[in-house]
Amino acid sequence: MGFDNWDEIRTAFHVARLGTVSGAAEALGVHHATVIRHIDALEKRLGTKLFQRHARGYTPTEAGRDLQAVALATEDQFSQLAGRIRGQVDTVTGELLVTSIAGVAPLVAPVFVSFQAAHPGVRVRYMADTRVFRLEYGEAHVALRAGAIPEEPDNVVQPLARMRAGLYAAKAYVRAHGAPAGEAGFPGHRFVTTHGEALRAPFHRWLRDRVSDEAFCFVASDTSTMAAAIRAGAGIGFLTVHEAQNDPDLVEIMPSRPEWEVPLWLVTHVDLHRTPKVQAFVAHIREAAKGWDAL
């Protein structure tokens, strides 16, 4: 295949990244029929299926994931080439794909804003999800991972910060139910938690060991919903110190403890780690993290 097929490859890249024909069509500014035509033509030319079709969208096969990785690297290289041709010193342009768990979003959103202020040619696509995005398949440029150190091969892993968490309740909850005086006061109180991968956090495990299942009156599907429930007065639960410290409607039930802290890792893939865009963002977020005294 030559450059005459790049439009089809680029289309497949966007379908793999976004998971739907409509999403890829919107990102590319083309009709959805064009996206389907490109995918069909590319699969016929390659002699293999790039996607599994299902009711929810398109999931890349192993061949599709390989193509996604190559297309991401190629798109970055084209962006750098365009910058050099225009004679620009700053070649930090194009789309930046970053992923993390949802709980990190309040912390990194200001970082994206300041990064784009310095590099207005960058379009940020931020994916907050509990699943682990595969950098080796081009699903993201940068991942922010919480918990145990990531061990996937060919990734560059750097420590970024430590997330601190405390136990909080809304003032409305405290007015209605009072505040427990330490662990001994937990019986009779209502608690908020989440389920799934987030429960592996040390502070969630700590609370689960000390509170009966019946006391968890609100179980959220994700940490953002859990935080909203705590703020609404549903019960007592854990929030990061960063998101809770300036909220006047929250009461600190128990302050952060060292054993509740969660390490946050900055992960990039070795093939893209030294590209100008990734290097610029890594340097920017590491500088911002120096000011994260309390997360």
Image (spheres, grey):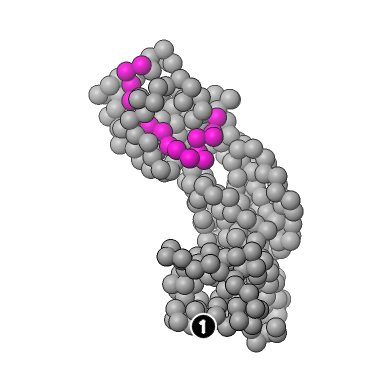
Task: Name the foreground residue: 77 vs 52.
Answer: 52
Q: Which quarter of the image is occupied by the N terminus?
A: bottom right
Please identify the residue farthest to the left as the structure is shown: 176
**Residue 168 falls within the magenta-colored stretch:** no
The residue wearing badge 1 is 37
Q: Residue at x 47, y 72 (%)?
A: 21
Residue at image position (50%, 79%) is: 35
Residue 192: which quarter of the image?
top left
Q: Nearer the viewer, residue 248 or 267?
A: 267
In the displayed structure image, the side of residue 147 where residue 204 appears, left or right? left
Amino acid residing under circle 1: Arg
User: Which residue does the image show at 61% across and 51% down from the upper left?
Assistant: 143
Tell me the magenta residue range.
Answer: 187-202
Q: Residue at point 43% right, 15% down? A: 182
Q: Farthest residue in the bottom direction?
A: 4
What is the count of numbered marks?
A: 1
Q: Check if residue 199 falls in the magenta segment.
A: yes
Q: Position of residue 189 (x, y in %)?
A: 33, 21
SS at mark 1?
A: helix
116 left or right, relative to 281: left
Q: Position of residue 161 (x, y in %)?
A: 62, 39
Is 256 placed left or right of 82 in the picture?
left
Q: Is residue 119 visible?
A: no
Image quadrant assignment for residue 272: bottom right
Residue 284, image x and y in percent?
63, 53
Q: Say whether residue 60 is visible.
A: yes
Residue 213 vs 150, above or below: the answer is above
